[in-house]
């Protein structure tokens, strides 16, 4: 508890926003640093809470006494008297909590006016119109805020008077009209409340203070706090600021305005704002008159403009942060009425961070800490022009951020063909499958009408950094007709559409975009981040192009190179099919022998781009049947082929018949039978049919009840050793070729789905064999590392054993989360997780925010046990959590060496890694694994 309920601006602690609110604390601070702030005082948030806590809403004892003595002090400072008919003191009563809640609570201006004081105000200013204008504003604001009189009742009367005198705009009203208005307003209050408008200034003050306190629990404010997650820890209760009124509407030597110390849109270092001559503060915001850009003050009021620039410099030098401030000029005197940290977009944040460091306002750590890593997302992906208003055609899930426009194309082959011609296309599917991958490469973005944030389309698009809207159920995609239907609208193939993967919106036509902005300043800031971070940031990348992008974003290596894409590229899939359908190891080997010469090229391309950074390659992970077409599709095709065979047989008969006739009628017809014969060769159809039937048999044989927990990863690697051996060999050969060319490579081979060290040791044997063979046949020395994914609970529990057989661990937190919760991600997210989150059974989606208390605790144990067996064990995390700032802080705290995430998130992760190290160094707590759930 603080000692008083009330603090003068000269005495309040400007750092204590919780007690004094943001506005109050800064008014104190500004007063104490010698800026020209109208005299005033703050009533604390504790007074507010105490008031709200009583059943009958009574003010805390002694509070009004303190207020009165503060008012007397104001009288002394201003030489005016509250309620005095000669020289009346007027004040504003302003709310302000610890967190800014724009427009949620209310401010009353000109408090202290009644018939007597009004007369004094008019005499003093010698301006009758000004006096009545102030009075009517006060009656309306006080009536609305403190007495609950609806605004409309006042507005009606105001309009009536305007009409009566034929005035189109407020300024056309004369003094007597304003008097008429204020009298009507007094009557409105009397009629509505059944009581006359309170005339006693201290009554007015007390009612106003209570009204501001009450506004804390008003519906608007409560909803706002819920919406923006403003918890009582962040802001509890509102303070009340009582401030001597200053008037910007006392003539042409008066003005009012708001300004930013730097441009909040670009970060440029110049005063940015607006002002109005002869106006009150609210006029600027209310948009009744159009304000002028603040630099015009340089000509209109040069001396005051100079003072304003001085004020700007003082504010920035003091707060060492861009400020958003309010000012009023009364008869040539400049007052500052409010300041707070300016809200800016990401580019402006980054630019001001770098420039303020250079100007000596901030050190590098401060410059880093003021930028929220998540906020960078804005700069890393193209986005729709925020000023452009367009109606969305439909909405799906925001599955991969960024925006893109292009022609809607309904199959991957066509998308690829058009993409290669340089056209911009959006691949539109009901859902996508691994065999659509070539279409992804060629498209600007992907739209699906089914599937969640973890559907194939979403995961692959995120990996590639392409925008994706998934599960847009309002759209019906008909790939046969090559059309999509959304309500009454039809999108034909070739129609241009725009998708916004950041919001999930889909638009017809091309919506203007703001390009991603990987600015020089961002590069500088991130280079500081790398100096400050302990964690290394790697990227997930599967192709040389991906790798190039990863480097552009500053990745320090590849933490996860998935090899499945090398299997379903269109030139590989037939060979892979051959390998799967093989009945004997020999047949399988024959297929693999065809793959082996192709695969080193893939790896070599990546190694070259990444040299000398490490590249971690994961051996084949998914269940093998994922490379096969679905049983359903195969059955369809086989049925068609059978029909076709009938037709072809018919053609053979036809050809024979024509041949017979042709003998009698020479000419072109004589060549016809031969052509038909060639086309109608049943053997051709038979061949295809047999192959398809074999694939179907295989698909049925490979069918699993629960493929994700079935025959995949290292299990596949041990049962079909040829596959892993071929991959390992390809990796090492690629590395050997690089070494021969003098390229510095650091391959790391990683085994997925491991649950026992035995598995690991066996694969290690393949690696060692291949390594010996490659070294001797290439005549080079090859360094590599061998490690394991940690994505199975048992592997974590046996981490010490695993460590003995591995140089590194990489937590696959997607699968590890599934395994720890025993949730299948897709089912969880589609069925019960939303409800769990809503009802607070679980706080977050553990697939988006690493579950530190459960999964994290397991990771922590595994790191400890692993390092107990091998102290220099390298440990990292791959998977989407690796790009999430809170998870990164956790990874830092448990001593991981690196995180790996999709390339476009690398900058976010680099900044987050720096934050983690700086904050941990400052002793600021992260989320601990043993905090109560
Ligand atoms: P908000 O938080 O909605 O901005 P404020 O309390 O800052 O509310 O006040 C609303 C408007 O009234 C602002 O333009 C402010 O500058 C102006 N204002 C507040 N107090 C005074 C005062 N004592 N003298 C002159 N103008 C004031
Ligand atoms: Mg304000
Ligand atoms: Mg996995």
Image (spheres, rainbow, N blue to C red):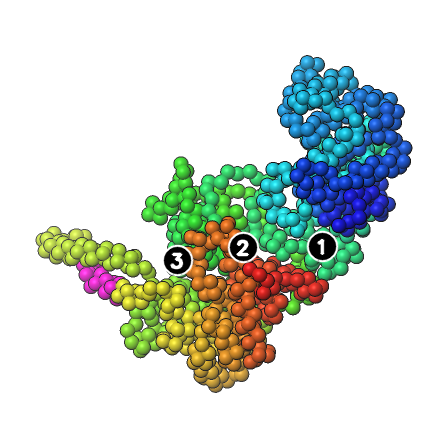
In the rendered image, residue 282, in percent from the top left (x then y), is placed at 72, 32
Is 565 contained in the magenta span?
no
Q: Is residue 928 left or right of residue 806?
A: right
Task: Say if mark 3 contacts mark 2, CB within 8 Å.
Answer: no
Residue 728 in view, yes or no: yes
Mark 3 secondary-structure assignment: loop
Marking on residue 433: 3
Marking on residue 328: none
Label 3 crowd bin: few (<14), some (14–19), many (20+), radius 10 Å: some
> Which picture quadrant has residue 711?
bottom left
- The answer for how far apart the CA atoms under marks 1 and 3 are is 44 Å
Nearer the observer: mark 1 or 2; the answer is 2
> Which picture quadrant has residue 224?
top right
Label 2 crowd bin: few (<14), some (14–19), many (20+), radius 10 Å: few
N-terminal of the pair, mark 1 or mark 2, is: 1
Residue 607 in view, yes or no: no
In the rendered image, residue 674, in percent from the top left (x then y), is placed at 18, 58
Q: In this view, does 287 lie to the left or right of 509?
A: right
In the rendered image, residue 676, in percent from the top left (x then y), is placed at 19, 56
Name the residue carrying label 2: 843
Label 3 beta carbon less than 8 Å to ligand 3: no
**Dominant secondary structure of the magenta stretch?**
helix
Name the residue carrying label 1: 353
């Amino acid at each position: 508890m603080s000692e008083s309920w009330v603090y003068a601006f000269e005495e309040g602690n400007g750092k204590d926003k919780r007690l004094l609110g943001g506005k109050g604390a800064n008014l104190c601070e500004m007063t104490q640093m010698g800026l020209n702030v109208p005299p005033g005082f703050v009533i604390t948030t504790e007074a507010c809470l105490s008031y709200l806590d009583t059943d009958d809403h009574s003010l805390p004892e002694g509070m009004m006494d303190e207020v009165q003595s503060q008012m007397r002090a104001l009288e002394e400072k201003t030489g005016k008297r509250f309620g005095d008919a000669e020289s009346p003191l007027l004040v504003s009563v302003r709310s302000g909590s610890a967190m800014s809640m724009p427009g949620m609570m209310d401010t009353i201006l000109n408090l202290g006016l009644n018939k007597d004081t009004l007369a004094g105000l008019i005499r003093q200013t010698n301006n009758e119109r000004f006096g009545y204008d102030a009075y009517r504003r006060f009656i309306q604001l006080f009536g609305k805020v403190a007495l609950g009189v609806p605004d409309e009742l006042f507005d009606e009367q105001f309009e009536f008077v305007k009409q009566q005198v034929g005035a189109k705009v407020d300024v056309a009203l004369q003094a007597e009209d304003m008097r008429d208005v204020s009298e009507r307003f007094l009557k409105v209050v009397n009629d509505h409340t059944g009581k006359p408008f309170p005339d006693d200034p201290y009554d007015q003050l007390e009612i106003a203070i209570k009204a501001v306190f009450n506004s804390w629990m008003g519906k608007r404010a409560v909803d706002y706090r819920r919406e923006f997650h403003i918890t009582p820890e962040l802001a509890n209760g509102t303070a009340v600021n009582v401030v001597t009124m200053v008037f910007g509407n006392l003539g042409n030597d008066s003005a009012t305005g708001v300004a930013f110390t730097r441009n909040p849109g670009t970060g440029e270092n110049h005063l940015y704002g607006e002002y109005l001559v002869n106006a009150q503060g609210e006029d600027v915001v209310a948009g009744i008159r159009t304000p002028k850009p603040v630099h015009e003050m340089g000509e209109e009021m040069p001396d005051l403009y100079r003072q304003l620039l001085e004020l700007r410099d003082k504010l920035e030098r003091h707060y060492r942060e861009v400020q958003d401030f309010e000012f009023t000029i009364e008869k040539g005197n400049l007052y500052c009425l409010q300041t707070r940290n300016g809200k800016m977009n990401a580019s402006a944040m980054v630019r001001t961070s770098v420039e303020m460091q250079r100007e000596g306002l901030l050190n590098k750590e401060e410059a880093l800490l003021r930028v929220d890593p998540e906020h960078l997302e804005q700069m890393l992906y193209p986005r729709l022009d925020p000023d452009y208003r367009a109606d969305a055609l439909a909405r799906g899930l925001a599955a991969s951020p960024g925006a893109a426009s292009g022609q809607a194309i309904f199959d991957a082959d066509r998308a690829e063909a058009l993409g290669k011609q340089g056209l911009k296309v959006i691949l539109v599917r009901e859902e996508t499958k691994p065999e659509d991958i070539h279409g992804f490469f060629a498209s600007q973005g992907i739209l699906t009408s089914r599937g969640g944030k973890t559907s194939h389309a979403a995961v692959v698009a995120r990996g590639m950094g392409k925008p994706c809207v998934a599960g847009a159920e309002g759209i019906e995609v008909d790939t046969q007709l090559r059309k999509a239907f959304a309500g009454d609208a039809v999108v034909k193939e070739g129609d241009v559409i725009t998708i916004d993967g950041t919001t999930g919106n889909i638009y017809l036509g091309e919506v203007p975009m703001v390009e991603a902005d990987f600015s020089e300043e961002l590069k500088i800031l991130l280079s500081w981040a790398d100096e400050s971070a302990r964690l290394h940031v790697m990227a997930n990348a599967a192709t040389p192009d991906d790798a190039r992008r990863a480097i552009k974003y500053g990745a320090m290596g590849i933490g996860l190179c998935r090899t499945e894409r090398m299997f379903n590229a269109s030139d590989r899939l037939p060979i892979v099919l051959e390998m799967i359908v093989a009945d004997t190891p020999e047949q399988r080997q024959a297929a693999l022998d065809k793959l082996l010469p192709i695969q080193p090229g893939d790896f070599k391309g990546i190694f070259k781009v990444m040299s000398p950074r490490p590249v971690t390659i994961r051996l084949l992970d998914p269940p093998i049947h994922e490379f096969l077409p679905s049983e359903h599709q195969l059955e369809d095709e086989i049925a068609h082929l059978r029909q076709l065979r009938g037709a072809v047989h018919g053609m053979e008969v036809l050809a024979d018949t024509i041949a017979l006739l042709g003998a009698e009628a020479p000419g072109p017809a004589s060549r016809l039978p031969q052509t038909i014969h060639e086309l109608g060769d049943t053997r051709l159809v038979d061949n295809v049919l047999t192959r398809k039937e074999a694939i179907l048999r295989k698909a049925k044989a490979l069918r699993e009840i629960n493929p994700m927990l079935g025959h995949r990863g290292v299990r596949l690697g041990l049962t079909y050793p040829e596959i892993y051996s071929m991959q390992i060999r390809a990796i090492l050969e690629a590395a050997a070729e690089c070494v021969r060319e003098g390229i510095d490579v650091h391959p790391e081979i990683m085994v997925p789905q491991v649950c026992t060290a035995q598995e690991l040791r066996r694969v290690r044997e393949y690696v060692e064999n291949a390594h010996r063979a490659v070294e001797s046949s290439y005549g080079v020395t090859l360094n590599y590392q061998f490690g394991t994914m940690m994505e199975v609970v048992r592997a974590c529990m046996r981490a010490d054993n695993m460590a003995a057989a591995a140089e590194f661990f990489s937590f696959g937190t997607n699968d590890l989360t599934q395994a720890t919760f025993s949730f299948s991600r897709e089912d969880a997210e589609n069925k019960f997780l939303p409800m769990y989150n809503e009802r607070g059974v679980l706080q977050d989606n553990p697939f988006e925010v690493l579950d530190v208390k459960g999964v994290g605790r397991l990771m922590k144990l595994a790191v400890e046990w692993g390092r107990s067996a091998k102290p220099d064990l390298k440990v990292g995390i791959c998977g989407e959590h690796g790009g999430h700032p809170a998870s990164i802080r956790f990874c830092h705290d448990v001593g991981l060496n690196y995180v790996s995430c999709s390339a476009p998130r690398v900058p976010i992760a680099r900044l987050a890694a720096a934050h983690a190290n700086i904050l941990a160094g400052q002793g600021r707590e992260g989320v601990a694994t043993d905090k109560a759930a």
